[in-house]
Amino acid sequence: MRLKQFQLARIFGIPLIIDYSWPPVAALHIWLVSNFWMVAEVQPSLPRWQNLLIGTFITALFFASVLIHELSHALVAKMEGLRIHDIQLHIFGGWARLVGEPPTPMAELRIAIAGPVSSFLLAVFFLLWLLIAQSLSAESQEVMAAQAAFLYLAAANLFLAMFNLLPGLPLDGGRVLRAILWHRRKDILSATRTTMKLGVWLAYLLISYGLLLITLAAVRGRLWQDFVVAIWLLVLGVFLKSAAESDYRHREQQFASEQTQPHDRKQWEGSGAVGAVMQSPVVSVTPDLSVAEFIDRILTTHRHTIFPVARDGRLHGVLSLAKLREEPREKWEKLTIGEVMEPIDESLFITVRASVEHAQHKLKMNSLGFLAVIDQDGFLIGHLNAKDLEKAA
């Protein structure tokens, strides 16, 4: 079930969105740090309420570090001329959502590397505070608590940077590698395919290690101690696999749209043919794209009400937002475009050489007020509606 998100604030004009999955993770983090980390690092132990207070402080600084990581991505993306949709905090950390894609391999590399660099700098920052705390001669509980807090934050930021640099999508390291491969191969789809496969293998490794951890813990009789870590690895592995494959589908979708070039209308001028009035290039979506991905990645960039649905340039159907809104939100994650589109039939498309009068007749018989335009080989090359035909009158 997809629950609502809410906007917490705006930072440098960028909306900060809190996902429904984030508060439980923050609460769990406070509990784990308070009851395990602080108890192990500070002896004799502090009162429970003090551990809870310090755990809350550490959690706040840790998620502030995650926010700085994502904000670094966003600000560098702004410098590269991209618009930022928002920054989201969720169960697996954060996500800076960009509108559009980096225009060049080097732009993508700079955007991708900005997050890990900021995390490395934060690790150094907290390490310096740890050294300052260790230089204090007093062996009080307060000093030990400060040392424990700064040690945790330095280690956590170092881990965040190192983990994100693993070379597989959707991690930053995967995007860095994709930028390098894109630069060398001059083919972003090929680079995305390679880094997607690496991301999927990384996900399988995490899932395998999680299962191994559960098995070994059960044999040793300490399942409860490793259960949280194992479950986290399993869920993280599934998430990374899904995100890597989603990233590739999105890039494949964008690549297919980019292949549809603006049609040369000079040959149609004065001919009274559909090719003279159609809109081209056309933004299409693939039938296997999930509704949630479509809304998050396509609709945020292209504010149309109707989209042709195509695969490999071949028309499969037409997606209407009016019909999409009839579907419950809780189904959007698993529902695909192919399941909600209008299947293709004669009333939904027209050939580029057809007359404008024929297009007008078809639109009157068409409940959507939309026609996809195909060429003589059956490939999608444009679309038109009643307003396009009015301009031709």
Image (tube, rainbow, N blue to C red):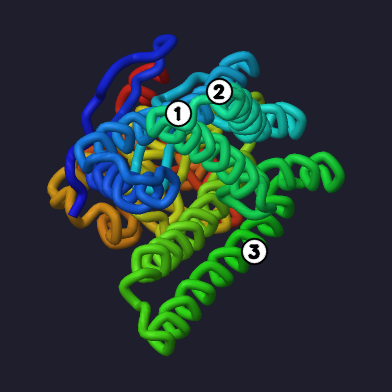
Indicate which disc, 1 or 2, sits on the residue closer to the N terminus.
2
Determine whether label 1 and label 2 are within 8 Å by CB.
Answer: yes
Q: Secondary structure at mark 3?
A: helix
| Residue matched to label 3 | 197
Q: Nearer the viewer, mark 1 or mark 3?
A: 1
Q: Position of residue 295 (x, y in %)?
A: 33, 40
Q: Quadrant of residue 338?
A: bottom left
User: Closest to the observer: 266 or 77?
Assistant: 77
For the point 50% across and 29% down, the residue is 70
Outermost residue on the top side: it is 12
Q: Earlier in the sequence, mark 2 or mark 3?
A: 2
- Horizontal and vertical percent position of residue 312: 57, 57
Q: Which mark is residue 143?
A: 1
Image: 15 above or below 181: above
Quadrant of image for the C terminus: top left
Q: Which residue, given by chain and number where applicable, does mark 2 sit on?
A: 136
Q: Residue type at mark 3?
A: Lys
Residues at marks 1 and 3, CA–CA distance in whole angstroms: 47 Å
Task: Count how many numbered circles sit on residues in the image.
Answer: 3
145 vs 224, left or right, is right
